[in-house]
Amino acid sequence: MTHKPPYIVDGLQYCRWDRGIFEQMRTGQLSAVHVTIAYWETFRETVANMGKWNRMFEQHSDLIFHGRTGDDIRRAVLENKTAIFFGFQHCSPMEEDIDLIQVLYDLGARFMQLSYNNQSLLATGCYETEDPGVTRFGKQAIAEMNRVGLVIDMSHSAERSTLDAIEISARPIAITHANPSFWEPALRNKSDDVLKALSASGGMLGLSLYPFHLKDKSDCTIESFSEMVARAADLIGTEHLGIGSDLCQGHPDSVVEWMRNGRWTRDLDFGEGNKSQSGWPDPVSWFANNEDFGNVTQGLADIGFNTGEIDGIMGGNWVNFYDTSFGPENA
Amino acid sequence: MTHKPPYIVDGLQYCRWDRGIFEQMRTGQLSAVHVTIAYWETFRETVANMGKWNRMFEQHSDLIFHGRTGDDIRRAVLENKTAIFFGFQHCSPMEEDIDLIQVLYDLGARFMQLSYNNQSLLATGCYETEDPGVTRFGKQAIAEMNRVGLVIDMSHSAERSTLDAIEISARPIAITHANPSFWEPALRNKSDDVLKALSASGGMLGLSLYPFHLKDKSDCTIESFSEMVARAADLIGTEHLGIGSDLCQGHPDSVVEWMRNGRWTRDLDFGEGNKSQSGWPDPVSWFANNEDFGNVTQGLADIGFNTGEIDGIMGGNWVNFYDTSFGPENA
């Protein structure tokens, strides 16, 4: 019988949210999920998305609630619910206004990527050909994010910008959803240098189950994934590893087109895909929705992780990170 | 007696606009002025600034009107008025939405800088330490600006980004207000390489009278300025030179603080100034307002420019550029 970790935390999801998915979260015993609520949205559009979530918290209060602190994960376990933490994949919600960082935090945001694929006002994205690192504004924004306790996420950022952010940030950062490039050399995955700097500074890597980040893509086996986790643990230790499934369930292809193209291009950009595979990739057979986290737990056990390590990777490490990363330091 | 050029066009001003300044424009016989209507403004805030200008066009219709075409400069001369052309010093008015380029053009915008001092979504500003050149979004935006006929202005951009923009743009670009760095090596001034590439592609340089861009700053003499114009003409020819005075008349120091700091920093940025000189610089004695363009004309005559050259630099070259740069090509 599969061991059940006390906490299961998913470092990133972006689903077509509905009651069915929240029920699957309960079946899968998800304690907490960091959900994306903005890709290219302006501040005002992001607030509208928060409004939609507030309605869902009201309508599905038996299944989910808005998480704001590490303790909310413990509350979720006690109440048999899933705590939902807000995050942005890009800095567009703060527009060009550093004061919006605290405003967004006050509204419940807990993660913000400094750049999404492209050059942003703060840092460079992974699909630019050049990466000048964190900008003048980016240095200011990092200091302010540190001050209010909004976590810096570099999942879609380029190498030098990511190393810069780790160096400049006074508090540990997160890469909520990506894999080591030693296993799958996608532009979105992370180099050994980044992984070592991340862990040395106390940061977290959420391991992704999104097919474009996996070796053999949609055909990736749980054995191959688990071997990668073991190698990553050899490289940086287990305590900096979590899951960040990047589960994107139920969306039509128009949504991945929005994620890639926003409003910035008149030519179609295919992101991690290409012209002949422009839509959503098929999920791997062993991870299609929130009910499948047990397969990941089992895979980690099968590759030889002990119970303490599994508990950490499946959720405990994120709990520790949430405990110290949100809100002002020593508050 | 001083020769009077048929057109006087100022490539950039940002004043505390009022009837007195519009009257000075008439005294100075200004045919056209490109005015800044946004530094860090969002789309919505830029539209509000357009609204304020629309009121001024209504209230002062005996002195000014909204210019949209090169022919509007000829109309201004015939009607003894000054045509006012809208421009932005930064790309913030288009936010992260390429479709706003045409919308802004339709509302009357004719110039947009790709970056202002800092890294933008499109290109790098002159005060960043790194300059990766035009971004992925920047390439898209340049193509769209070329399509609708919104002029690319690189006055506050960094070197490589400026060379990139000249290379990528299918239509000539402008540097509406800057001087050659061979004369005054300010970060905002332009290298010989930039000036040569700009002129080779049919672009225009508007020579600045803002003290921070001048040799000896507020003590710069008209002789020194005119000698610089002569050297610039030797380097790139007279037909690519105009005036872009950067006249910033009547503002309190809080306005230059806004121009430098926008909403991007919690530390004070001093831009071209410094802590001990944080406010507006004093204007040079021979150029304090729109009545003083005759001094510039006279200075060019004194240094040996002939009448045709003077007429071009004081306005005719901008008229030629406006004639071909606004709106779709061959429209």
Image (spheres, coloured by chain):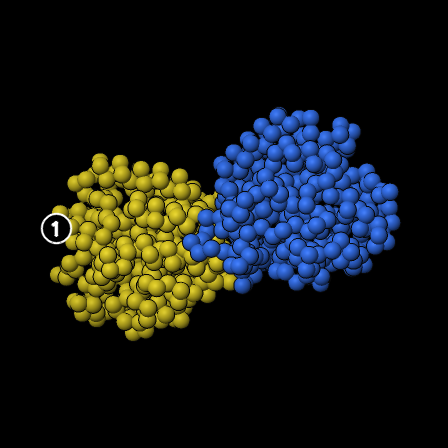
Chain colours: A yellow, B blue
Report crowding for label 1: few under 14, some 14 to 19, many 20 or more residues within 10 A (C-alpha): few
- Taking the view exactly as shown, the residue that stands out farthest to the bottom is A234
Q: Nearer the viewer, residue B5 or A67?
A: B5
**Which residue is found at the position 66% from the left and 55% from the top?**
B218
Q: Nearer the viewer, residue B65 or A91?
A: B65
Amino acid beneath label 1: Leu
Look at mark 1 in the image and give the residue it sits on.
A78
> Relative to residue A144, is residue B315 drawn left or right?
right
Q: Position of residue B147 (x, y in %)?
A: 64, 41
Q: Nearer the viewer, residue B219 or B232?
A: B219
| The N terminus of chain A lies in quadrant | bottom left
In this picture, is A160 found above or below B125? below
**Which residue is found at the position 31% from the left and 60% from the top?**
A206
Q: Position of residue A256 (x, y in %)?
A: 42, 46
In this picture, is A313 found above or below B266? below
Q: Position of residue B263 (x, y in %)?
A: 46, 48
Residue B14, picture quadrant: top right
> Relative to residue A212, is residue B220 drawn left or right?
right
Mark 1, secondary structure of its residue: helix
Q: Chain of mark 1?
A: A
Q: Nearer the viewer, residue B316 or A226?
A: B316
In this picture, is A285 found above or below A255? below
> Relative to residue A226, is residue B212 drawn left or right?
right
> Relative to residue B137, is residue A167 drawn left or right?
left
Residue A300, picture quadrant: bottom left
Q: Position of residue A210 (x, y in %)?
A: 35, 55
In this picture, is B173 found above or below B103? below
| The C terminus of chain A lies in quadrant | bottom left
**Which residue is found at the position 84% from the left and 52% from the top?**
B302
The answer to whether residue A315 of the structure is visible from this angle is no
